[in-house]
Amino acid sequence: MDITKMSKMGWPPFLQAMNSTAQPLNSSSSFPGIMDTFLVSAGQASPLLQLFLFFYRFVGAQLGLDPSLLLTLLGCLWGLSKLFDQVYATIDNFLHTYFRCTIYVSENDQIYSTLMQFLSEQQDIATNRHLTAQTVFKSAWDEEEDQADVLATNTVEDGEDSPKYLNFASDAARCNPRYVPAMGTTGFWHDRTYFRVNRKRESLQSTNGWGGTKDVEELKISCFGRSIDPIKQLLADAKTAYFLDTRHKTTIYRPRIKESRRDAWSMWQQVARRPIRPMRTVILEHEEKHDVLRDINEYLHPGTPKWYASRGIPLRRGYLFHGPPGTGKTSFSFALAGVFGIDIYVISLQDPTVSEEDLAVLFTRLPRRCVVLLEDIDTAGLRRPNDEEDEEENEDGTGEKAGEAKGKKTEKAEKKEKKKSKNAKDSSDSDTDSSEEDRKRRRKRRRNRRDRENTSNRGTNNILTVESISLSGLLNAIDGVASHEGRILIMTTNKPESLDEALIRPGRVDVQVGFKNATSAQASELFYRMYEMSRNKPVPMSKTKPTAPKPQNGSIHSLVDNKGKKTTLSIDELKTISQEFGQLIPEGMFSPAEIQGFLLKRKKSPRKALEDASGWIEATVKQKELKSKVVTVQ
């Protein structure tokens, strides 16, 4: 059977005619064509071309085809594909210009993450053939499903009992990734409109003149039509879905790392998202708590800015929460943010990467309504003018280190008295001029030394040695001419007496709230709330039929306390026990955090907590009298 003849039967007539005139390559005659002559001469010169010549002859000998014709066909197909790409790009550009609307979203914008979360939940995106998988890191509050039902348990053989403990070895395997559109163009339908999302990453040069390039991703959302309203509605739906997901949570922001704060739109980054803290969980006097709520509510009213502007008053409000540690100052701040549905922006003045310039810019990049939290303002290490004078005196030949001189108040007072007496004795103009010149020289030497330290540190990969923020720098950021308006500033401190008067004057701190250790009534309220919430909202550990587990210490199935008494109490019984517990707590002796820590260790046994309260109180009071840090009873 002649394979060549069979292959010719399916060819078009013009290809059969061309093949009939061509000479077979396996004949003994010389190569008839110019192509063959070129291949012979080229094959003798290059091994690569010799390999190409081998396949050229092999195709002609085995298939009975003219390789030149085959190469011509491949070249035509390649040219047609390029022509098709060019025509498609031209038509697509024409449609994009005249028949499509487009909105661009940068990855540095806050709406980018909102939109990507919304796209990952679209059914058309999930069934697309080209996707990008992303690992989802959930917090403890995001895992609201019945996760306890699918957790495995480990049995630990320890003595007579064999308690069961949770095992999270397979927890990561059950966490499904999030699927978002891949790089390039992805289409999907939403609300009877076809959208196209194009993800593109570009390298942009830094705009401030220093630093390298940065890869920035951009989303291009387009749809057919002359109206851009469908895309706006898509973004509105994405924001609505985000609101429904976060309306019962408080978002916490912190400054980005120094390398990422170069761009104005990326000064803050989200670090956590926590459930709203109920206001009733904050231990504070009822009247004082509601005074703060009414004051903030009036400040956030939409008509307040106009009232302030008509009277020339800056639209700012500051609060100072002071009291012993563990009394609920930070908790009250989070509860306030949850009540009014605003976010919290936390700034640490001890962060070595936050300079005075960064602090001023951070305040200008705050949203319209938010809570700015400055915790432990008394330990922030703010520089004051007196500190600079003391440093100058220490550098002038005292032989002591600046840090040691700052830590001794008596030495400061003596030096200031000597300085005053010296100024009183110096009556001549020449002495005064020389002292001023010496002071200027010392300041210049100090600035030069700091510049040399910062310059030497810039050449390394270590964190730059940045001076602590001065008091004047903080005051300018809070209520300077260019400071932000509309925010709520909350400062917390354990020692209000150590704060500078300029920091807490009216206008910067409008309301001061004092927190104290828990009273007997507050301890009783804390006890009732601890067990009342778990009684009204039980957490089922399994959907299977309940069994009668044995009382096991530490077991997740333990439903009774050590005495065999049921932990389920009626409202009257719980109120009685809480009052008895409150009568045992001394007035103003324990902070709410200490009482809460004691109750957490007995969160399933209110009767046991009442029985252990006397021993815990006695041991803790003795520990405080001895000023010991070792806890004997917990």
Image (tube, rainbow, N blue to C red):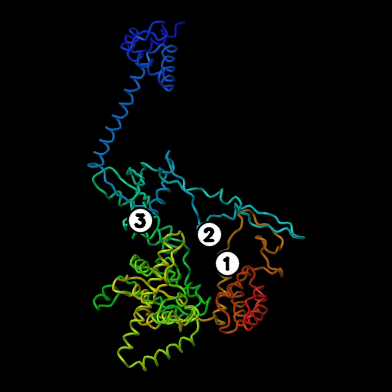
Give the mark nearer the N terminus: 2 vs 1: 2
Depth check, mark 2 against mark 1: the one in front is 2
Q: Nearer the viewer, mark 3 or mark 1?
A: 3
Q: Name the residue under label 3.
A: 109
Residue that carries the numbered disc 1 in the rendered image = 534
SS category of the residue bearing label 2:
loop
Query: Pointer 2: what residue?
Result: 140
Q: What residue type is labelled 3?
A: Asp
Name the side, left or right, on which 116 lies relative to 560.
Answer: left
At 39% across and 91% down in the image, what residue appears?
422
Q: How far apart are marks 3 and 1 (CA)?
A: 40 Å
Q: Work out whether residue 136 can be spotted.
A: yes
Residue 427, picture quadrant: bottom left
- Residue 90, image quadrant: top left
Looking at the image, which residue is at 44% across and 87% down?
415
- In the displayed structure, 395 sits above or below 212; it is below
